[in-house]
Amino acid sequence: MKKESKLLIIVVTIMAIFGIIMIYSASSIWAEYKFNDSFHYAKYQLIFFIISFIAMMICSKIDYNIYKKKSNLILLICFILLILVLIPGIGTLRNGSRSWFKIGPFGLQPSEIAKIGLIIFVSKYLEKNKSILTNIKKGIIPILLIILLFFGLIMLEPDFGSGMVIVLSLLLIIFASGVKLSFFAFLIILGLIGITGLIVIAPYRLKRIISFLNPWSDPLGSGYQIIQSLYAIGPAGLLGLGFGNSIQKQFYLPEPQTDFIFAIICEEFGILGVIVITTLFGLMFYLIMKIVIKQKDLFAKYLAFGLGMQITLQALLNLCVVVGLIPVTGVTLPFFSYGGSSLLVSMISIGIILNINKK
């Protein structure tokens, strides 16, 4: 196994194990109250990690060219799953979003699976149509329509955070393929119009933007999570309050083991915790980009780049939300937040990148 691959496995394993430890710390009080078991969420996350680690190692053995051959089938399966999850009785409603399949005590989120499926399909499309990518009408518009179709299905759940991560990741792959910059200027304008339309359709998104600009305008409503997150981060100092000593996890910050786990890490480990988390993600990104640069096969290059950027973008969006730089998007922190689907997809993505690095 190559040096980059070994280091990448070590980095993501450290993040996932640290994530399990922090999930215990963040959720122990809530889990004790709700399930009479302070280890409830940590135990499930440990199971998710074992399954995900095995899946990563299996994917590292599977020739990535198989995904290229089966890309249409993979995309079709993702499309069917995104439709099925919208059907009452099949998809499970959770926190106002019908975005889950309930499988016993576990949940599966098809939008997470679609992240990988779309990256595979777009990577193959860009490689296959390299000669016509300069022709926006023939080369780019068809793939954009497919991306918008999947984004639309995800928005019906609704899951704006996952939708944004997917769209931004795919646009970055298209950008890396060498499409004219003027086209992206047009997309920015189109995106602003689209976001405006989404706000008009669902006014709660406007409340999120207002609460982002001034959380104290609605401290018990749309601004509540951001305020509690900032209360966790603000007093932490250099070394934080110490492991297990978070105040905000004591029924102030809702479900701190999920989207806002970074706030608990900041509260308990201070600036040192921030440095550790950002360094781990930075090292992961550096290793993946080293693998990307070495690839001569265009499909492999696009695929590794897309999978790496998807994880990095999601992490960046989550960190920005937690510290109040952007409105709440509902995305998890990869490898750290509680949740089987997110961890499984992140580890599978790393597994595919590991296989690409074997060539």
Image (cartoon, helix red, strand yellow):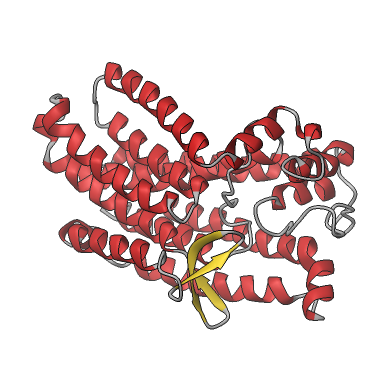
Q: Residue furthest bottom?
A: 104
Please tell me which residue is depicted at 23% across the width and 62% down the height of the picture. Answer: 76
71 on left or right of 8: left
Residue 348 image position (x, y, % from top left): 41, 62
Please tell me which residue is depicted at 59% across the width and 52% down the height of the picture. Answer: 332
| Snapshot quadrant of residue 338 | bottom right
Residue 73 image position (x, y, % from top left): 20, 63
Q: Nearer the viewer, residue 68 or 260?
A: 260
Q: Nearer the viewer, residue 208 or 273?
A: 208
Residue 142 image position (x, y, % from top left): 18, 39
Please tell me which residue is depicted at 46% across the width and 41% down the height of the picture. Answer: 164
Q: Is residue 60 visible?
A: no
Please tell me which residue is depicted at 38% across the width and 21% down the height of the picture. Answer: 189
324 on left or right of 299: right
Residue 129 image position (x, y, % from top left): 12, 38
207 on left or right of 36: left
Q: Is residue 346 visible?
A: yes
9 on left or right of 246: left
Q: Is residue 35 above or below residue 77?
A: below
Q: Is residue 60 above or below residue 176?
A: below
Q: Is residue 242 above or below residue 23?
A: above
